[in-house]
Amino acid sequence: MKQHHLIIAPSILSLDYSDVDHQLDLLKRSRAEWLHFDVMDGHFVPNLTFGPDILRGFKKACPLFMDVHLMVEDPVFFAQVFMENGADLITFHTEALDNDPARIRALLREIHSHGVQAGITVKPGTPIEPFAGILPDLDLVLIMSVEPGFGGQSFMEDQLEKVKWLHRQRMEKDLPFRIEIDGGINDKTYKKAVAAGCDVLVAGSYVFKNDVISSIAGMLE
């Protein structure tokens, strides 16, 4: 199995939009490698966030790896839109494709055909085990440790069982996919996530409501 180093992916959902230039400057000076970009359509989740023009602007202003998480009813349509505007990795919800392995594989193939990395994610109530057969096709699996749709929620520790299962699968089958976790990550919960097997941490409120540079560095030490 390929050994992955730990990556911090600050979520722009928690960015202070009254101070964007300064916060992006801090991110560029920090040890963050990815930027987590939440796309919500107001239907799949009851919130509305960012369109492709915003992604293109962030890509120009902050040359980090763009980790795009689609929380949308039509991931096939939106994957294409965001690939055209700078996404480096597209993660979509299995529930949006009725948890159908054939439809999920088709979208993974389409994303990969554009030279973009691809991954799946599940809501807290959706089991991960049914997707064991898809794991070889993935660059990343994102485990939601909160209900998707809003920032600032509390960490759901029971979701670490999914992380541990993924880590075992990765070890036993010698698979290269990364394991990402999103929701309630802070100076305490990140340690539990890493111990369970995560190698990408999405952190929003904890990064942007504290000192950006030191909060990121602290999770890497």
Image (cartoon, rainbow, N blue to C red):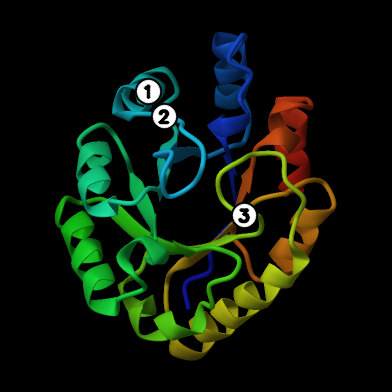
- Disc 1: which residue: 54
Q: In the rendered view, does 69 fall on the left or right side of 101? A: right
Q: Secondary structure at mark 2?
A: loop
- Give the percent coordinates (x, y) of residue 69: 43, 47
Q: What amino acid is found at the position of numbered circle 2 in the picture?
A: Phe
Q: What amino acid is found at the position of numbered circle 1 in the picture?
A: Ile
- Disc 2: which residue: 50
Label 2 CA crowd tier, 10 Å (few <14, some 14–19, many 20+) = some
Q: What amino acid is found at the position of numbered circle 3 in the picture?
A: Glu
- Which residue is found at the position 37% from the left and 48% from the top? 72
The answer to whether residue 174 is seen in the rendering is no
Instruction: Choose mark 3 or mark 2, whichever is in front.
Output: 3
Picture quadrant of residue 175: bottom left
Instruction: Choose mark 2 or mark 1, whichever is in front.
Output: 2
Q: In the rendered view, does 147 fall on the left or right side of 105? A: right
Label 3 and label 2: CA atoms lie apart by 18 Å
198 is higher (above) or lower (below) than 73: below
- Which residue is found at the position 53% from the left and 69% from the top? 3
- Give the percent coordinates (x, y) of residue 50: 41, 29
Instruction: Choose mark 1 or mark 3, whichever is in front.
Output: 3
**If you read the primary sequence from the N terminus, does the residue marked by circle 3 or circle 2 appear first?**
2
- Disc 3: which residue: 147
- Which residue is found at the position 21% from the left and 58% from the top? 112
Q: Secondary structure at mark 3?
A: loop
**If you read the primary sequence from the N terminus, does the residue marked by circle 1 or circle 3 appear first?**
1
- Give the percent coordinates (x, y) of residue 64: 44, 33
